[in-house]
Each structure stands twice: as C-alpha cells, then as structure tokens.
Image (cartoon, rainbow, N blue to C red):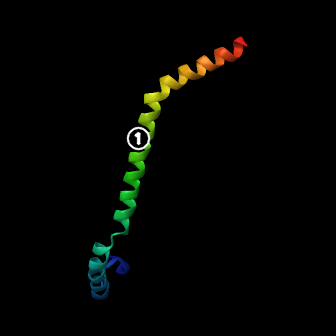
C-alpha cells in the first residue's frame, strides 16, 4: 500500500474541523439564485419574442411592400 494514501490522524482532524465552515458557506446558494433569476428572465424574453414574432413579421412585410411600391 502506498503510504501517501493512508489518512493520518492529523489529516482526519483538520478535515473534520473544516466541515462546519463549509456547511455554513452560503456564497454558492446566492450564485445559484442569480442563475435561476437569469434563466427565468431569458425564458420570459423568449416567450415574448415568440408571442409577438408573427406580428412583427407582418409589420415588416407590410413596410417592405410599401417601400417597394413607392
């Protein structure tokens, strides 16, 4: 067995002392919340674009036809 793979009592005690600090760290939660908010905003923009997409297409086609006729 490789001696570097064996956990020493010192390594175990420092790892145990880190758990409360890692458990109480909330910075990752905030990043996830911002990501969810950004995703919701992106979905709202996409839904709005699909909802008014047909109207915009007909508006531009009408304007294009009017410009070609003059």
Residue 17 as seen in the image, left or right of residue 64: left
Q: Residue at x 35, y 81 (%)?
A: 3
Find numbered disc 1 in the image and state the secondary structure of the residue it sits on.
helix
Q: Which residue is mark 1?
A: 44
- Please rate how many residues cluster around mark 1, counting C-alpha atoms within 10 Å: few if below 14, some from 14 to 19, many from 20: few
Q: Residue at x 37, y 58 (%)?
A: 32
Quarter of the figure with residue 8: bottom left
- Residue 20 vs residue 54, the one in the foreground: 54
Residue 45: where, in percent of width, then height?
45, 40
Query: In the rendered view, would you say 15 is above or below 40?
Result: below
Give residue 50's quadrant in the image. Answer: top left
**x and y percentages locating residue 59 in the rendered image:** 56, 22
Quarter of the image with the C terminus in it: top right
User: Which quadrant is home to the N terminus?
Assistant: bottom left
Q: Is residue 26 left or right of residue 51?
A: left
In the rendered image, residue 12, in percent from the top left (x then y), is placed at 28, 82
């Amino acid at each position: 067995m490789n001696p570097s793979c064996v956990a020493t009592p010192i390594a175990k005690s420092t790892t145990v002392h880190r758990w409360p600090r890692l458990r109480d760290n909330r910075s990752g939660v905030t990043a996830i919340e911002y990501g969810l908010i950004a995703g919701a905003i992106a979905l709202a923009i996409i839904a709005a674009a699909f909802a008014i997409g047909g109207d915009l297409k007909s508006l531009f086609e009408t304007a294009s036809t009017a410009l070609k006729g003059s």
